Image (cartoon, rainbow, N blue to C red):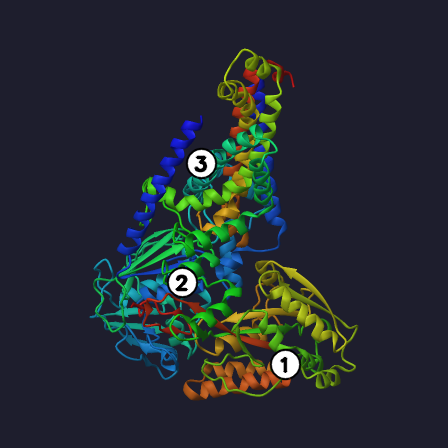
Amino acid sequence: MQLKLGTALAVLVTALLVSGAAGASTRQATAGGTLNVDLATDVDYTDPALSYLSTGWELEYATCLKLMNYPDQNGPKGSQLIPEAAAGFPRVSNNGKTYDFTIDTKFTKFSDGTPVTAASFKAAFDRLADPKMQSPSGAFMSDVVGASRSPVSGIQAKGSHLIINLTHAGPDLLARLAMPFFCAVPANLAHDPNGVNTPPSAGPYYVASRVPNRTILLKRNPYYKGKRPHNAAQISYTIGNSLDATYLRVQQGASDYASGGIPPAAYAEAAQKFGINKGQFWVKPFLSTGYLAFNTSRGIFKDNVALRKAVNQAIDRRALLAQGGYLAGKRTDQILPPGIAGFRDADLYPLKQPNLKAAQKLAQGHTGDGTVVLYESNRGASPLRAQIIQYNLKQIGLNVDTKLFARAVQLEKEGTRGELFDIADEQWGADYADPYDFINVLLDGRTIQATNNNDFSYFNDPTFNKQMTQASLLTGSKRYTAYGNLDVAIMQQAAPWAPRSNANNRMFVSQRFGCFTYSPIYTVDLAAACLK
Amino acid sequence: MLRYFVRRLLWACMLFVAVTLVTFVIFFVIPADPARQVCGQRATPECVARAQHFLGTDRPMLVQYAKFLDRLVVHQSLGRSFTNRQDVTQEVLDAAPVTASLVFGGAVLWLMISIPIGILSAVRSRSLLDRVTMVAVLVGISAHPVWIGLLAAYFMGFRLHLFPITGYCDLFSPTGDCGGPIQWAYHLFLPWATFAVLFAATYVRMIRAYVIETLGEDYVRTARAKGASEARVLRSHVIRNALLPVVTILGMDIGLALGGAFFTETVYGLPGLGKLVVGAIGTFDLPTIEGVVVFATLCIIVFNLIVDTVYAWVDPRIRLT
C-alpha cells in the first residue's frame, strides 16, 4: 500500500512539474496580440437585439456598426455623437418627424462578407419589433411609426437611404440610435428569441465564438477598413473568475482588464500602488445618479415639500458615498449627472456635511407621526447607507424603519403604485446620453401606472410635466438649457428626491494595456485598446 | 428483492416530485417578476405582459409545474434560462463535469493525504507526529474553504507562480484555449487541495480512531501471536478492516461535497454546478435553479438507490425494514 502511495505521489509531482512548464509556455504563446479580459459574470447576450447589461454594451461597442456613434476618444470629445455608417447627419423634416439618413459603408462589410446597406439597419428595427424576439428595446423605439409589429412600417430602406418616420418629433433620436440595439445586422439574421451567440457584425470586431459562462472570443473583422481603431488581433474573455482572483490575475498579467471590477476593498490599495489615471488604475465618471426618492403620492412626504427639503439638508452625502469604497463617486444634490448635456452646477443643498440647523427648522411641524419606511437593497453598501440615513433622519425627529430586499424584489415593490414605503434608495444609469433619460423617464408623473414604474417618487406635478414635454421637443442648446433649468427648478421647488452621488467607474488594467480610452456610455473602449 | 426495489423506486419518485415542487413554491413566494428583468430598467407594461407570456409566468403555478414535468419527462429538457435564454440542459451538462472533476479529484487527494497520516498517527499514537498531525487536523477543520482558497491562490498562484490563480481546462474536447489531462490537473490542483483540506482533516481523525480500535481486536492479537510481521498485521488485518466504514462514509460525503463545492468553485472561478446555481439564485432564474436541483436530486436519488439495493442484496435483513 505504501509503495503504491509513493508511486502515485511521484507521478503527481512529475505531472505538476511538466504542467507548470506547459502553463508557462502557454502564457508566453498567447501574449502577443490578444487582449485578455476577465468578466466575473457572463454577459446576458451577445446578440445586439437582446443585450442590455453594461458589460454586454462594452463588448457591442467593439463589434457594432451604428448609424451614429461616439468617437473613440477620451474626455468631452468622446461624448459627442458623430455619424458612423451615415454619410453625415440626417436630413430632418420641418415637423421633426422624418429622419433621412444617407448610408455610406464602403469601408466595411459584415464579418461573414455580406455587404452593409440601408436594409441592414432596417433589418435591425424589424428584428427588434418582432414580438417573438422579446427585445427590451421597445421603450427606445416606441415613437417610430408601426414599431409594434415587424416589419416596421415607419422604417424605409430606399437605395442608400434609410428613412425613419416618427409619430411625433423626437430630438433625442440620434442619441438613441447610438444604442447597440440599433446596430446593423444582416437582413437574413434569424429572429431567434434565444438570441444568436455569434452574430455577424460590421464594426471593428466580431464575436468569433462564445461558450456561455466560460469564454467569448472577439476577432478583428477582416472587412473593416473604417476609422475606428482595432488594435488587438483578438479579445479573449474569460468568464467566472472571482473579483479577488481577477485583481491578482491582472496584476500578474494573466489578464489585461478586470471588466467585472475588482473587490471594493482593493480600490484604495490599487490607487496607492498604481496611482490614479496613471496607466493601470483609472477612475472616470459614469452617467448615473444615486438618490433617495420620496414617495410623494402617500404618507409623510405627500404635499410636504418642507420635509423633503429638510431631508436634503440633513443627509450626510459624504458618509453615504464613502460606503461605496474609495473613489466611488462624487457627491451631488442634482438630478442630472455632470457630463450629460444640459447639466449646470447649482449649489442647492449641503454636500460637505449636513446642515442640521436648516434641516431642523424646515422639519419643524412637518414630521407627522415621526416614522418613515425606507426600502433598501440587501446587497453591497446599501444596508450601510440605510444605517446612515437612519441616523441622519433621527436628528430631525424621524424614526426610520428600514426594510431590506433582494434588488429585484425591491424594484418590483417600489415600482408598484400604492406600495407602503416613504423613501426608496435608488440609482439610475443612463441608457443613452440625453437629459430626457433622467428627467422625463424618472419624474414625468403622466407615466405612472399600476406596476413597473420608474418614477419611484410618484412625482406628478402638472406644471413640471408640461415643462418636461416642452423641453423634450426642443433641439440643440435650447433643449439642454431647458433641461438644465428644469433640473435645478425641480430640486429647488419640489425636491422629490434627495440626490446623493454620481458614480465613478473604477477600472483596473494590466501593465501592458495601452491606448486606454473611456466612453462614459460604454465604459472601456476595447477596440481602441492596444498592447504595450 | 424485486418488491424492495420497486418500493425504493416509488419513494425516489415521490422525493423527486417533493423537492422540485418545493423549489417551485419557494420561487413563487418571492415577489420578484422575471419578466421585468427581461424588459430591463425601462420596462413598459406591454413589454412585461408579453415577456410574462413568453416565459410562461402568466399561468398558475401548478400549470407551470405540470409543464415543467412534461418537458422533463417527455422531452428530456430542462427548458431555457430566464436571464440569458440558454438551454438549461446544456448548461447543466457543461457544468456537471467541472463539479465532478473537483469533487472526485478532491476525494482522491484527501484520501491520499488522510490514509497514510491517519494510519501513522494511530500506529505512533501520542508521539510528536501524532500531536502535530492533530493540530493540523484542527486547523483544517476550523478553516473555511474560501479563506484557504484565497490564501492558496495568493501564495501559490500569485506570489510563487506555481499554479494558475483561477480557471478551468477541460479534460477532453477543450472549449477554450487550454485542455487535456495535464492542463486539467494543473488548473485543478489548488482547488483539489483546498477542497481536500477540510475532508482530509476529518478523515485523518476518523481513520486514526478506527485503526486504534482495530489494533485492539482479538484477531490482531492472534495474528501477532502467530508470528506475523507488524507490516503484515497492519496490511492484512488492521487497514482492511479499519477502512471498511471509511468507504461507506466516503460515499455519503461525496454526495454532501457536491453541495458544498460552490465555495471552492467561486474562489477559483470554476464553471461548475455550484457557481451556476448561485448565479441563477441572484437573478431569480427559475429554470436554471430547477435544472441544477433536478440534476443534484437525481444524482443523490440514483446514488442512494444503488447503495440501498446493494445493501439489501448483501444483508437480507434490510429488506424487512
B257 sits left or right of A88 in the view = right
Q: CA distance from mark 2 to mark 1?
A: 45 Å
Q: Which residue is mark 1?
A: A495
Protein chain holding label 2: A
Viewer-side residue, B192 vs B91: B192
Q: Which type of secondary structure does the marked residue at label 3 adopt? A: loop
Q: Residue A205: x, y in percent? A: 28, 63
Q: Please name the residue that numbered disc 3 is placed on.
A: B76
Do tags 3 and 1 sit on the same chain?
Answer: no
Q: Work out which quarter of the rendered image holds the N terminus of chain A and state it.
A: top left
Q: Give the mark, 2 or 1, whose residue is nearer the N terminus.
A: 2
Q: CA distance from mark 3 to mark 1?
A: 56 Å
Residue at left offset 71%, top offset 75%: A393
Badge 3 vs badge 1, beta-carbon distance below 8 Å: no
| Viewer-side residue, A347 vs A149 | A347
The chain to which mark 3 is attached is: B
How far across and how far down the image is residue B230, in percent? 51, 20
Query: Residue at the top extreme?
Result: B226
Residue at 51 percent across and 81 percent down: it is A469
Q: Could you say where residue A180 lies in the image, as x and y percent from the top left?
A: 37, 66
Compared to A200, does B221 lie above or below? Answer: above
As measured in the structure, the alpha-carbon distance from the residue carrying label 3 to the one carrying label 2 is 45 Å
Which amino acid type corresponds to the residue marked 3 in the rendered image? Gln
Judged left or right of residue A390, residue A426 is: left
Q: Amino acid at mark 1?
A: Ala
Q: Would residue A486 be found to the left or right of residue A115 on screen? A: right
Q: Are tags 3 and 2 found on a single chain? A: no
Name the residue tied to disc 2.
Answer: A251
